[in-house]
Image (cartoon, rainbow, N blue to C red):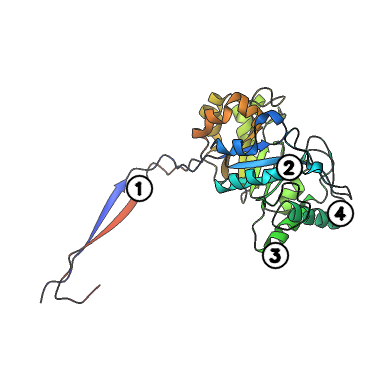
Amino acid sequence: MASPSHLLLIVFLLPALAGFSNADNIAIYWGQNGNEGSLADTCNTGLYSYVMISFLTTFGNGQTPVLNLAGHCDPPSGTCTGLTADINQCQSQGIRVLLSLGGASGSYSISSSDDATSVARYLWHNYLGGSSSSRPLGDAALDGIDFDIAQGTSDNYGYLAQSLLDLGSQAGTKVYLSAAPQCPFPDQLLGPALRAVTFDYVWVQFYNNPSCDYSSGVSGVAGAWRTWTSSLQSSTVFLGVPASTDAAGSGYIPPRDLTSQVLPAIQQTANYGGIMLWSRYFDRISGYSAAVQNSTQPKILIPTNSTILIQVKIIQRCPDCNFS
């Protein structure tokens, strides 16, 4: 009888990995300057993973919703339906495209839970997976809704977020939710919604807030970052920064400082997602995203005293034996 097969276990001890890279992790706002290029051109740069079409500036409280895309197109005349092809092109590249609600100017509020349900239904049928004869952006279904609430009160935005999730769940479709709170924690307007509902992405605006933006140095940014990420452990959190000195009143971080000082101080956080830039217009002029894109990925460190074991089975088979 031939000898049984031999099982040899070989263990390779590999040095600890220094980091781990994903695809580019940059989100961008598009839609508020006609000189920023088309939506398709924005996605074709290969620089962004998320694009927020901004803004739906009027909604809620019985108002007729208004989409404002600056000089790109005119929703009332129907010219924005041409964005369908651009949206489809972006999504075909794996880019998530969301509609941003709010902004610094406009007229918006959610007066009650019933109002929240009504607004959610409008968004579902006119921008997401539903159907309507008057879809402002045409037949393309956006991936989700972004909350950039910069005025009014915090009332009922949690109801709106939950209603959107419910509509998607009923249709078997994932509705992605994102939010852009200010860096002082908790955000006065979005804090309640962020506590009530788990948002997929939270791009915290680390600008126009000297107490926690780069005006307070790396330590100020890192301290606020720890507060946000520890409080939203189920959300992916992004560092929101202006793409040029002209894009915000404070908080601009020179690309070299971002990559050498700020990102290393925050990238090891488990729910770090990347950076958000305001906006495509300023980024197109400054080239900010191109300068930092190779440094925005999450870093997952393994302790220096750890090893990775790879087991390899080598079997010498016996032609006269019956075993597997």
Q: Nearer the viewer, mark 2 or mark 3?
A: 2
Q: Nearer the viewer, residue 48 or 276?
A: 48
Q: Which residue is mark 4?
A: 112
Can you say whether 28 is above or below 306 in the image?
Answer: above
Disc 3 designates what residue? 170
Task: From the image, tell me which residue sits under label 1.
Answer: 307
Type of amino acid at the residue the image marks with label 4: Ser
Q: Residue 263 lies in what quarter of the image?
A: top right
| C-alpha span from label 3 to label 1 | 46 Å
* Secondary element type, mark 4: loop
Structural distance between the alpha carbons of marks 2 and 3: 28 Å
Is residue 147 in sight in this rendering? no
- Label 1's element? loop
Q: Residue 107: which quarter of the image?
A: top right
Amino acid carrying label 1: it is Thr
Residue located 14% across and 76% down the image: 320
- Marks 1 and 2, how far apart in space? 55 Å
Q: Nearer the viewer, mark 1 or mark 4?
A: 4
Where residue 198 appears, as percent x and y from the top left, is 67, 53
Amino acid under label 3? Gln
Circle number at residue 80: 2
Badge 3 crowding class, 10 Å Cα cut-off, few under 14, some 14 to 19, many 20 or more, is: few
> Can residue 131 be spotted in the picture?
yes
Mark 3 falls on what kind of element?
Answer: helix
